[in-house]
Image: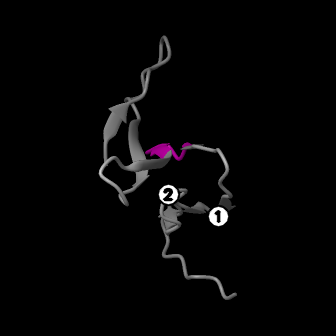
Amino acid sequence: MTRVPSPRQVGENRPIATIDRWECHCQDSPVLLATYDDRGRINIKIRDRYWTVHEGVVRTHCPRCGAEHVLDLSGKKQEKPED
């Protein structure tokens, strides 16, 4: 994952948050699904995609290959829900 420092606010003494990219690697140039940082902020790339967010777990499908991706930031193991 690519880590990019986020901009700091003037007078802010907190360390810079580390931003991670959530990508699908179905092609040579990865498809960006979202970015998230170590403070719990998630920036979702939205176009024609549907997202499911529940208790710190984000689910979506890649717009290129259709594969489902799960990003679990809840800190606990997530079981797959029953259909």
Does residue 60 sit above or below 12 in this rendering? below
Label 2 packing within 10 angstroms: few (<14), some (14-19), many (20+):
few
Taking 29 as reference, is 79 above or below it? below
Q: At 49% from the left edge and 69% from the top edge, which residue is drawn? A: 67
Label 1, secondary structure: give it.
loop
Residue in view at x 53 percent, y 66 percent: 66
Q: Residue at x 44, y 21 (%)?
A: 7
Tag 2, which secondary structure?
loop
Residue 58 position by quadrant: bottom right
User: How far across and down, in percent of the image, does residue 75 sit?
Assistant: 48, 65
Q: In the rendered image, which quarter contains the C terminus?
A: bottom right
Q: Identify the image's colour scheme: rainbow, by chain, secondary structure or one colour.
A: one colour
Q: Which mark is residue 55?
A: 1
Residue closest to the eye, 73 or 11: 73
Side (left or right) of 32 relative to 80: left
- In front of the other: label 2 or label 1? 2
| Label 1 Cα neighbours within 10 Å, binned few <14 / some 14-19 / many ≥20 | few
Residue pushed farthest bottom? 82
Residue type of the residue flagged with mark 1: Glu
Residue at the limit of the structure toward the top, as seen here = 10
Q: Are marks 2 and 1 in contact (CB under 8 Å)?
A: no
Instruction: Check disc 2 and report the residue beneath it.
Output: 64
Tag 2: residue type? Arg
Range shown magenta:
35-42
Q: Is residue 28 part of the magenta span, yes or no?
A: no
Determine whether 80 is above or below 49 in the image.
below
Is 19 located above or below residue 50 in the figure? above
Instruction: Name the spot of residue 74 as percent of width and height, x first.
Output: 53, 63
Does the magenta run of residues contain 36? Answer: yes
